[in-house]
Structures are given as structure tokens and as C-alpha cells.
Image (cartoon, rainbow, N blue to C red):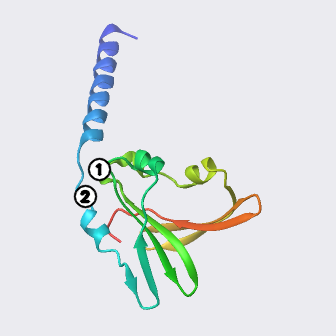
């Protein structure tokens, strides 16, 4: 490779590195107001806020998070909603966390949604079984 091509390649790599750092630090508009509008109660259900664990606070960092326990006649379930606009690294595929906590994914089904699809998981850990669903949105849906 000629010295000129090497210089151009090095300059391009430096430019890409600078752009990556700038992009990572660029603040996106937050969805905190939309998170606050998530219903806490309705016909046949109610909820209460849950405190995040130390590990969750560490993982989510500056991200806005709503974590609630919802209850209805059908049972109880936990909902965690993460706005990753202030911490893009907090938004990741939750299967990593399930596996890291010792759960095995026994089954996975796709559920089509406007703008993408949700994943419905059947999880197992020893004799215990749980179900989980998750999806990602850019806020337009």
C-alpha cells in the first residue's frame, strides 16, 4: 500500500472514531413524559411502583425506568419499561439477563406488532417456570 493510501486510511479511521464518540455522547430527546403516562390502574387491574435492585440501577444507569407490579383477577405480573435515550447501553435483549440469572429459555414465540415484533418467552429454572414478553419501539408506535 502506498504511503498516500495509508495516510488516507488512517485519517478515515480517526474520523470514524471521533464520530463514534460524538454520537455516543449525543443526547436524544427523552421519553420520560410518555413513561409517566403509563396507566397505573384501570378496569380490573391496579399496580404499584417497585423499587429497582442495585444491579438494575447499575445496568440502567441514567436511563429512565418504570418498574411496576400489576395485579388483576388473572394474576400478577411485573412490567419494566426502559427509555434508553439517555443511556443507549441500558437497552439490550433481556434474554442475556434471564440467562445470566440462571433461567433457561424453554420456548420462544414471535408476536407481530405494528412496527416490529414482540418475543414471548417460556423460562425454566429447575422446577420453576415463568413467562416473559418484550419488544423494542422507537416511540412511534
Contact, CB < 8 Å: mark 1 with mark 2?
yes
Reply above or below: 97 against 71.
above
Nearer to us in this view, 71 or 88: 71
Picture quarter with the N terminus: top left
Give the label on residue 53, or none.
none
Reply above or below: 97 against 21.
below
Q: Is residue 111 left or right of residue 3?
A: right
User: Residue 28 location in percent, x, y?
Assistant: 24, 52
Quarter assignment of residue 9: top left
Q: Is residue 84 left or right of residue 98?
A: left
Reply above or below: 102 against 134.
above
Q: Which residue has dot 1 on it?
A: 86
Q: Is residue 138 left or right of residue 27?
A: right
Quarter assignment of residue 89: top left
User: Residue 30 location in percent, x, y?
Assistant: 25, 58
Q: Which residue has dot 2 on it?
A: 30
Label whose residue precedes the other's in the sequence (1 or 2): 2
Amino acid at each position: 500500500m502506498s504511503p498516500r493510501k495509508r495516510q488516507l486510511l488512517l485519517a478515515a479511521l480517526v474520523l470514524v472514531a471521533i464520530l463514534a464518540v460524538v454520537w455516543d455522547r449525543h443526547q436524544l430527546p427523552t421519553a420520560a413524559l410518555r413513561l409517566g403516562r403509563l396507566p397505573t390502574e384501570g378496569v380490573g387491574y391496579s399496580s404499584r411502583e417497585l423499587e429497582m435492585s442495585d444491579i438494575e440501577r447499575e445496568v440502567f444507569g441514567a436511563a429512565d425506568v418504570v418498574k411496576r407490579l400489576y395485579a388483576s383477577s388473572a394474576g400478577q405480573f411485573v412490567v419494566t419499561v426502559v427509555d434508553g435515550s439517555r443511556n443507549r447501553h441500558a437497552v439490550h435483549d433481556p434474554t442475556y439477563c434471564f440467562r445470566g440469572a440462571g433461567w433457561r429459555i424453554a420456548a420462544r414465540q414471535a408476536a407481530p406488532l405494528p412496527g416490529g415484533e414482540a418475543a414471548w418467552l417460556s423460562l425454566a429454572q429447575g422446577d420453576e417456570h415463568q413467562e416473559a414478553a418484550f419488544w423494542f419501539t422507537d416511540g412511534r408506535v
